[in-house]
Image (spheres, rainbow, N blue to C red):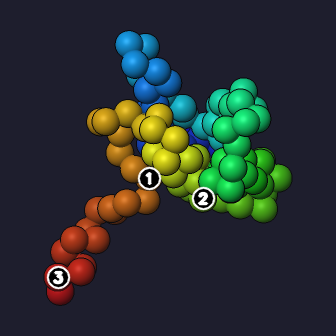
Amino acid sequence: MDRLQFEVPVRIAPAPGLPVEEIYSVEQALDFLQDWPKRRQGKIYEAAFNACFGATVDVASTEEACRAFATFCRVSGLLARDAMFPGKRRAGTHREARA
C-alpha cells in the first residue's frame, strides 16, 4: 500500500444532487484543497492543507493528514452522511474503555 494512501477513503458530497466522491490519498486531498476558493479558506483549511503537504514531505503522518482533511470536510459541510470519520473509533476501543 502506498504510504500516502488513506486507510479509509474520505467520502464527500461536493454539492446537492452531485454523486458522492471518495478521496483515497493525500495527493487527492491536496488536489481538492488547491481548488478550494480563496475566499472560503480559513484556519481549518490551512490546517488540512499543511497536514496534507506535511505528509508528502514526511513531517506529518498520512493518518494526521486524513484526519485534518476529514475535519475540514465536516466543518465545510462536505462530508457525506455515510462517511466514517477517520480516527474516531478503532477496533477494541469500546471494550478497553469499559474495562
| Percent of width and height locating residue 29 | 64, 36
Q: Is residue 93 left or right of residue 43?
A: left
**From the viewer's perspective, is 6 left or right of 34?**
left
Q: Position of residue 22 (x, y in %)?
A: 48, 28
Residue 64 is marked as: 2
Q: Earlier in the sequence, mark 2 or mark 3?
A: 2
Secondary structure beneath dot 1 equals loop
The answer to whether one can see residue 66 in this image is: no
Residue 77, compared with residue 85, is above or below; it is above
- Distance between mark 2 and mark 3 Cα atoms: 26 Å
- Distance, label 3 to label 1, CA atoms, is 22 Å
- Tell which circle, 1 or 2, labels the residue nearer the N-terminal end: 2
Position of residue 48 relative to residue 79, above or below, is below
Residue at 19 percent of width and 75 percent of height: 95
| Front residue (pair 91, 21) | 21
The N terminus sits in image quarter = top right
Q: Amino acid at mark 1?
A: Pro
Q: Which residue does the image show at 24% across and 80% down from the upper left?
A: 97
Q: Amino acid at mark 3?
A: Arg
Instruction: First in sequence, mark 3 or 1: give its number.
Output: 1
Give the labeled residue for mark 1. 86
Where is residue 69 drawn, in percent x and y? 58, 46
Instruction: Assign a secondary structure to mark 2.
Output: helix
Callout 3 secondary element: helix
Q: Is residue 16 above or below residue 36?
A: above
Quadrant location, the C terminus = bottom left
Q: Disc 3 marks which residue?
A: 98
Kind of residue sitting beneath label 2: Glu
Whether residue 26 is visible, yes or no, is yes
| Residue situated furthest bottom in the rendering | 99
Q: Residue at x 49, y 48 (%)?
A: 75
